[in-house]
Amino acid sequence: MMKPTALIVGRFQPFHNGHVKLIDWAAEEVDKIIIAIGSSQESHTWENPFSADERRRMIERSLKTLYRYEIIEVPDVNDDRIWVSHVKRIAPEFQVVYTNGELEIRLFREAGFEVRTTPLFSRDLYSGTEIRRRIANGERWERLVPQGTIDVIREVDGVRRIRELSRIL
């Protein structure tokens, strides 16, 4: 029996070890993973400091060829009623969605998709908000992200970018 294709949606600001654990978890149950970079039009803000291309590079350098995956970019539509159909237009066919977001769970289930939740992998540590806070405050953050993310953040001078954005708040 063929395993399904999964969709995982995230902002990946930045791509961190919790995301890697989520993908590891899903990869045990599915044949292929579609990684959807949400809010793909956003960058250079406190909530979304990295561009879609920078986030794509973080993911690709971190995952390398460990899994069968494809990365897509999903810009916001700011309308929950059409969001799932918007994702379906952009994404290749998928049968199952991995998410722990209450809104995403409800929207995808209402659209007829199987939704699977996962354990929250040290959510207090592995969150983009916490990692950005640590970077802004000059605290250690590197152990919370894979090496591919560290490399991209350094290449784009992301530490300086986040620190400058934190001063605007």
Image (cartoon, rainbow, N blue to C red):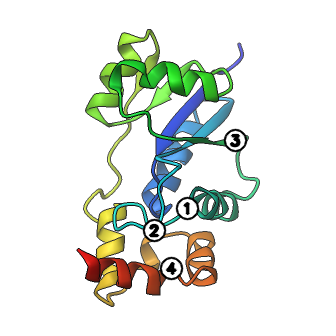
| Residue at mark 1 to residue at mark 3: CA–CA distance | 20 Å
| Residue at mark 1 to residue at mark 4: CA–CA distance | 11 Å
Q: Residues within 10 Å of mark 1 (few under 14, many from 20)?
A: some
- The residue under label 1 is 51
Split into 4 quadrants, where in the image is the N terminus? top right
Amino acid on which the number 3 mark rests in the picture: Tyr
Q: Position of residue 168 (x, y in %)?
A: 27, 78
Q: Residues within 10 Å of mark 4 (few under 14, many from 20)?
A: many
Q: How many marks?
A: 4
Element at badge 1? loop
> Looking at this view, is 156 or 24 the one in front?
156
Q: Are marks 3 and 2 in contact (CB under 8 Å)?
A: no
Amino acid on which the number 1 mark rests in the picture: Ser
Element at badge 2? loop
- The residue under label 4 is 158
Q: Which numbered disc, 4 or 2, marks the residue that appears first in the sequence?
A: 2
Q: Position of residue 77 (x, y in %)?
A: 43, 33
- The residue under label 2 is 44
Amino acid on which the number 2 mark rests in the picture: His
What residue appears at the point 31 percent right and 58 percent down from the top-left corner?
A: 122
Q: Are marks 4 and 2 in contact (CB under 8 Å)?
A: no
- The residue under label 3 is 69
Q: Residues within 10 Å of mark 2 (few under 14, many from 20)?
A: some
Q: Position of residue 139 (x, y in %)?
A: 32, 87
Element at badge 3? strand
| Residue at mark 4 to residue at mark 2: CA–CA distance | 10 Å
